[in-house]
Image (tube, rainbow, N blue to C red):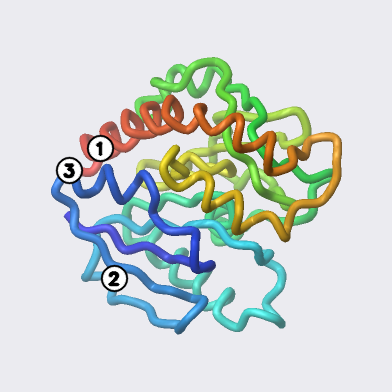
Amino acid sequence: MHIHYFQHDHFEDLGFIGDWALKNNFTTSVTRFDLKQEFPSHNEYDWLVILGGKMGVYETDQYAWITPEIEFIKEAIHLGKIVIGICLGSQMVANALGAKVYKNTEPEMGFFPVTFNTDSSKDSIFKHFPVELSVMHMHFDIFDLPTGAICMSSSEVTPCQAFRFGENVFSLQFHFEVTEANAANFIQEITPEIVTGRLVQQPPKMLQNIGFCKSNNQVFAKMLDEIILLSN
């Protein structure tokens, strides 16, 4: 099995997904949009993972690769590939499914709780999630729930923090891929983006909370394990 992933910033890599992939005998390859716009053939991968980034889906005038990337995601979904979107990636997946992406009423930055609903508890992929988890947020934007998708979780100011579409598409607004090992570097790199706000933690507070990454990774592993069963 092979994972191809889309990376938009130099520091936002696969993180825990890379660790999990190695353990489960997946091979990986990457398109670095911060370096070069380059797409694989759809025949070259089994899973497509779209990672985060500081840009917005609507900033197509500044980032020429956004529109073709979303078109590629549409094709991957249509072909039945496993598609997983994280943060910006979740917004791109939502947009590829026809949903609007726009600025939230206020940013979420740092470790704050998300609540998982009853649809999550009944879902084969999301059933391992507890009712509440404190997860790493780093986003200004949100999206409407795509038609036909099922919302799995929410937070105080974000109606949809995760969704599933059909048998092959999974979207997480939060950063489940950040590990205890790379959290400090992640926080350092995003520091220039941090603003002030009610739901914004400053870097020292974020660093105090990186212990949440371990339990989040454990839940993420169970989710990814279930997707393997689904895709076999």
Q: Residues within 10 Å of mark 1 (few under 14, many from 20)?
A: few
Determine contact: label 1, label 2, CB under 8 Å.
no
Residue type beneath disc 2: His
What residue is drawn where x is 48% and y is 51%? 85
Q: Which residue is mark 3?
A: 24
In front: label 3 or label 2: 3
Q: Residues within 10 Å of mark 2 (few under 14, many from 20)?
A: some
The picture places residue 54, in percent across and down from the top left corner, at: 65, 63
The alpha-carbon separation of the residues under discs 1 and 2 comes to: 19 Å
N-terminal label among 1 and 2: 2
In front: label 1 or label 3: 3
What residue is drawn where x is 22% and y is 70%? 43
Q: Residue 195 versus residue 176: which sits nearer the camera?
A: 195
N-terminal label among 3 and 2: 3
From the viewer's perspective, tell me whether residue 76 is left or right of residue 63. left
Q: Residue 102 versus residue 100: which sits nearer the camera?
A: 102
Q: Which residue is mark 1?
A: 230
Residue type beneath disc 1: Leu
Q: Which residue is mark 2?
A: 42
